[in-house]
Amino acid sequence: MSKPWIDSPTLECRLDEPGLGLCQADVARLMPHAHEMLDDLRSQMGEVDGELAQMIDAGTDGRFRAEAEAWGEFLGRSWQELLLANCAYDAAIRVFMCSGVAVETERGPVLARNMDWWPERPLALGSVMLRYFRGSEFAFETAGWGGSIGAVSGRSSRGFALAMNAAMSTDPVQLSGYPVMLFLRTVLEGAASYTDAYEMICHAELASPCLVMLVGTENNERVVIERAPRRHAVRRARPGDALVVTNDFRVLDEQSTALSADGHGLYRSACGRYEALGNQFESREVDPDSDDAMLYALSHPDVRMQITAQQMVFRPRENRSKLVAPGEFFAVHHKT
C-alpha cells in the first residue's frame, strides 16, 4: 500500500558563498510554487511596505538582507517582499495551526510535527528541506519553500531541533520585538547547544506570541516554551510520556488563548488534536523508532487538518531528519 505522503527534496545552501551558492537550475522546480506562495501572502498582507521592510532589516542588523536579495533575484521580486514574506507569522497569525509531539527513544528524543500553514497547496508542492553549510560542514536545516529565510521547523548540527506553533495571547504585539520566524532562524544558526537555544527562546523579546517545542539529544531535553512577546513559561516532558503541543497555552495564562481566539474555528480544534495525538502514544500503539510510524500518527484523521502542508521528523542525536508533504496535493496537481 502506498504511503499518503511524498518525500520532499533537499537543497544545499552555502552560507559563505554569494547567493547561498545556488544557481537558477537548482531552484527552478521550486519557483512556480514560490510565486504562488508570495502572491497569496501579498493578498493577505497587502502591498509591499518598503518602509516596514527597511525597519525589519535595520532591527535585525541586516543579517538577512543578502539572502532576501538572492531569493529576490531568482524570483524576480524585491528583497523587501521576500523579507516581509518571512515575517508572515507576525502579520497573519490567525491562519497558522500545527500539531507536534516529542517522544523518548533509546537513541534519544524524536520531534515530529504537522505544519498546518496557509496557503497549503503551494507550500506542499514547493516543500523543500534547506540544508545550510559553512564550508564543508553541515550547520543547520529548515523545512521551508523556495524563498524561505526564517524558520518554523528545523534542526541544528549542535544537538537540538525546534518547531514553532501558533498561539494567541492577550498581550500586545511588540513592534520592537524580533519577528518570530527570523528569530528562530537565528537560534538554529547561532545557538551553541540545546541549553543555549533554550535560554535564547525563553528570554528574547519577540514581536508575537508563539509556542516553541525544543528537543535535544537526551530524553530529558524535551520542552514546550510558551511565549508571549515579553514573558515565558515552560512545560516539560514527564519521563516515559509523550510531550504534545497544538495551539493553546497550558502554563502561561491558560485562558489567554481561549479568550483571544473566541469563535475562531481553527483554534477550537486545538484540544481535539492534542488529545488525539496524545492518546496514540499513551496507548503505545506508535513505534517512535520508526519515522513512518510517527508520520502515520500525524496523519490520523483527528490530527491532520485540511491545511496540513508539511509533516516532518527530527532526530537530533542521530543527526537525521525527514520532511514529507501530503500526497493528495500532488494527485490534484497532476490532474490539473
Image (cartoon, rainbow, N blue to C red):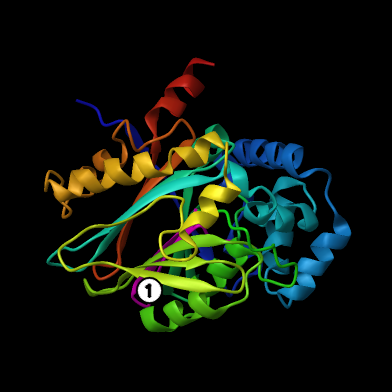
Examine the image and state in which quarter residue 251 appears. bottom left
* Residue 154 position within the rendered picture, expressed as x and y whole percent measured from the top left: 44, 61
Q: Is mark 1 on a helix, strand or loop?
A: loop
Residue neighbourhood size for the residue with mark 1, other residues' Cα within 10 Å, grouped as few (<14), some (14–19), many (≥20): many
Q: Where residue 205 sits in the image (x, y, percent)? A: 62, 75
16 to 182, vertically: above or below: below
Q: Quadrant of the N terminus?
A: top left
Q: Is residue 61 left or right of residue 289?
A: right
Expressed as whole percent of the image width and height from the top left, the position of residue 79 reads: 77, 57
Q: Residue at x 50, y 55 (%)?
A: 255
Q: Which of 182 and 18 is in front in this view?
A: 182
Q: Nearer the viewer, residue 21 or 176?
A: 176
In the rendered image, the residue lying farthest to the top is 335
Quarter location, residue 179: bottom right
State the quadrant of the C terminus: top right
Relative depth, front residue between 227 and 99: 227
The type of residue carrying mark 1 is Ser
Left or right, 286 with reference to 127: left
Q: Residue at x 21, y 71 (%)?
A: 219
Question: Where residue 242 sits in the image (x, y, percent)?
Answer: 23, 57
Residue 212, picture quadrant: bottom left
Which residue has dot 1 on it? 157
Q: Can residue 299 be seen in this view?
A: yes
Q: Magenta includes 162?
A: yes
Point 22% across, 67% down: residue: 238
Q: Which of 266 and 328 is in front in this view?
A: 266
Magenta stretch mostly in which secondary structure? strand
Does residue 18 belong to the magenta stretch?
Answer: no
Which residues are drawn in magenta?
150-165
* In the rendered image, the vertical position of residue 56 relative to residue 297, given as above or below: below
